[in-house]
Image (cartoon, rainbow, N blue to C red):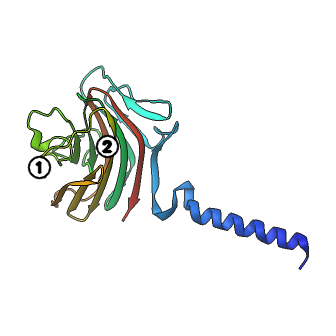
Amino acid sequence: MARSSVAVLGLVAGLALAGCAQGPMGQPGGGWITLIDGPSGLDNWNRYGTANWRVVDGVVQADKSEKGSGFLVSKADYKDFQLRVEFWASDDANSGIYMRCQDRAKITDKSCYEANIFDQRTDPKYGTGAIVHIAAVSPMPKAGGKWNVYDITVKGPRLTLVLNGVKTADVEHGEFANGPIALQWARGVIKFRKVEIRPL
C-alpha cells in the first residue's frame, strides 16, 4: 500500500477514535452531557429572577439579587438521569439543585425535587444533603467554605443523593416524572464549577 494511503487511513482512524471518545455534539464519553464547564457555562440555561448569575474565572456564580431567589433553569427537560455537580457554597448560602420541575417560571421545593444546599436551615433535617419535604438527613453534612460534589441519580420513582462520597438520601417518590433542572441562589455565595448529566 502506498505511504500516502497509509497516512490517510491513520488519520481517518485517529479521527474516528477521537469521535468515539468525545461522543456526539461534543459531549464527553459514557453519555455524559456537560451543562456547565468554563466560560460557556450559561449557554445551556435560562435565567429566572434577578440573581446576578455570571461567569467569573470559568465558574458560574451568584451572590445577590434585586428581589427574591434567582434560578438558572436548563433549556432541556430530563426524566431519568445521573447528575454530577461541583459547587462551592459560603457558610450562609441558601441554594439547591431542583429536578423534574413542573413550571419553569415558578420553581419551588413543592413543584420540583430539591437537593438542598443550606447549612444554616432552621430545621436541619431538610438542610444540606436532604431532599426537601421528602427525604430527611441526619446528621446534616456541612458544605460551607469548600468545594463539594453532589452525585444525584433519579430513575423512575427512586432518588439517591451522594454528597462528597457519602449517601445522604435514598427514597422512592413518584410525584414528578419529568422536567428541567434548576440551580438556585437565595442567600450568600454559590458557585458551580461543573455540571454534567447522563440520561439513563
Residue 159 image point, x, y percent: 22, 59
Task: Looking at the picture, tell me which residue is in the foreground, 154 or 75.
Answer: 154
Q: CA distance from mark 1 to mark 2?
A: 21 Å
Which residue is at a point 51% across and 39% down the rendered structure image? Answer: 38
**Residue farthest to the bottom?**
1
The residue at the point 51 percent across, 62 percent down is 29
- The quarter of the displayed image where residue 87 is located: top left
- The picture places residue 23, in percent across and down from the top left corner, at 55, 62
Specify the quadrant that holds the C terminus. Answer: bottom left
Q: Residue at x 56, y 61 (%)?
A: 24
Viewer-nearest of discs 1 and 2: 1
Disc 2 marks a residue whose amino acid type is: Ala
Q: Are marks 1 and 2 in contact (CB under 8 Å)?
A: no
Where does residue 7 sit, x and y in percent of width and height?
83, 68
- Mark 1 and mark 2 lie on one chain; the one further toward the N terminus is 1
Determine which quarter of the picture holds residue 132: top left
User: At label 1, which amino acid type do we have?
Assistant: Ala
In terms of image quadrants, where is residue 82? bottom left
Q: Which residue is mark 1?
A: 136
Label total for image:
2
| Placement of 144 over or under 79, stated as above or below | above
Q: Is residue 175 above or below residue 129?
A: below
**Front-most of residues 76 and 17:** 17
Give the residue at mark 2: 182
Say which element carries label 2.
Answer: strand
Label 1 SS: loop
